[in-house]
């Protein structure tokens, strides 16, 4: 994965449920985000699009005054996607889940151990 792409917990990642024609560029992908998902494109969230055979993935994000598309094509294999609610148009995935999708790590086999969660109170 390129060092230009930083996957952080400071951003929300929305995986579009329908397969996407990878010939779509900035304007048409923005149109999907606005018209189908009802979301703001320039809010800092990232939007993930995958083609039907799940061999190509595009991630659209707006930051620092412009749009960026991260485009990944697999030479072998396919991207695994989490199970979707069939009524949903998209689902939010964590930065960890997106990293696993990009690396080809099976999502169903991942088990998280319990960790302390700070509730924001001052000691």
Image (cartoon, rainbow, N blue to C red):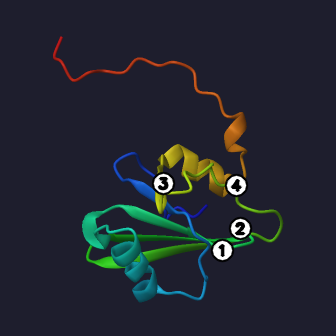
The reply to whether dot 2 and dot 4 touch (C-beta < 8 Å) is: yes
Between marks 4 and 3 in the image, the one whose residue lies nearer the viewer: 3
> Mark 2 or mark 3, which has the lower sequence index?
2
- Disc 2, SS: loop
Question: Could you tell me which secondary element the residue under label 3 belongs to?
Answer: strand
The residue that disc 4 covers is 80
Give the position of the C terminus as an image quadrant: top left
What secondary structure is found at the residue carrying circle 1? loop
Quarter the N terminus occupies: bottom right
**Image-based side of 14 in relation to 108, left or right:** left
Residue highlighted by disc 2: 54
Q: Nearer the viewer, residue 15 or 115?
A: 15
Residue holding disc 3: 91
Most extreme residue toward the top is 123
Q: Residue at x 26, y 21 (%)?
A: 119
Looking at the image, which residue sits at the far left? 122
Q: Which mark is residue 51?
A: 1
């Amino acid at each position: 994965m390129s060092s230009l792409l930083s996957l952080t917990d400071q951003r929300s990642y929305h995986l579009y449920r329908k397969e996407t024609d990878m010939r779509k560029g900035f304007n048409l992908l923005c149109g999907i985000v606005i018209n189908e998902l009802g979301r703001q494109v320039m809010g800092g969230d990232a939007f993930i699009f995958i083609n039907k055979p799940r061999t190509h993935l595009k991630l659209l994000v707006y930051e620092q005054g412009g749009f960026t598309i991260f485009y990944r094509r697999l030479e072998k294999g396919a991207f695994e996607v989490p199970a979707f609610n069939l009524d949903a148009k998209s689902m939010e995935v964590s930065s960890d889940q997106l990293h696993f999708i990009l690396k080809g790590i099976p999502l169903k086999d991942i088990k998280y151990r319990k960790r302390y969660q700070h509730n924001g109170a001052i000691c």
